[in-house]
Image (cartoon, grey):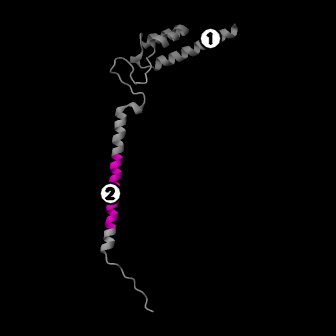
Amino acid sequence: MARLMIFVFVAQIILAACALISCLSADKSDIRALPRFVWVLIILFFPLLGSIAWFFAGRPVATPPGGRAGRGPDRYRPVAPDDNPEFLGSLAAEQAKKDRELFERWEEDLRRREGEIRRRESDPPIEEKRPEA
């Protein structure tokens, strides 16, 4: 029986620590039902019941796979950078800029090489003097 009580006590402390960390790291506008200060007091004074209450009634709603969460239907939070249209647009613009720069360097190099070839063709060939035998 003593082992069970020790196990329950340790589990209660761990649960209270997790609830406190979750409460303190949650965005202030996402905390439901009560202000953060009240939730912290409830968790500290009633560790088991306060922790359970926090996870069921006070914790922010988890972000669903669609990416919408928080208060109101217009609040949008992308789940990952791949789901953020602004981020994807900036990547596309950055890649287009790099492609233009690369293309300009290739054109410049091609013009330089063509100029060298034209100069070689327009210059009279230098005749080698062969020793007469």
Res 92 quadrant in image: top left
Does residue 69 belong to the magenta stretch?
Answer: no
Q: Residue at x 58, y 12 (%)?
A: 12
The residue sitting at the bottom extreme is 133
Per the rendered image, the range of residues in magenta is 97-116
Residue matched to label 1 = 9
Dot 2 falls on a residue whose secondary structure is: helix
Judge whether 57 appears above or below 64 on screen: above
Task: Describe the element under mark 1 as helix, strand or loop.
Answer: helix
Residue at the disc numbered 2: 107
The mark that comes first in sequence, 1 or 2, is 1
Residue 131 x, y percent position in the rendering: 43, 89
Residue drawn at (36%, 17%) of the image? 71
Percent x, y of residue 68 = 38, 22
How many marks do you count on the picture? 2
Image quadrant assignment for residue 112: bottom left
Which residue shows up at 39% across the image and 27% down it? 78
Q: Is residue 44 left or right of residue 69?
A: right
> Three-letter amino acid code at disc 1?
Phe
Q: Is residue 18 above or below residue 42?
A: below
- Pick whichever, 5 or 44, lies toward us: 5
Whole-number angstrom distance, CA of label 1 to CA of label 2: 74 Å
Q: Nearer the viewer, residue 88 or 5?
A: 88
Q: Quick check: 129 left or right of 14? A: left
> Identity of the amino acid at label 2?
Glu
- Give the residue at the far left of this rendering: 122
Residue found at x 49% / y 18%? 22
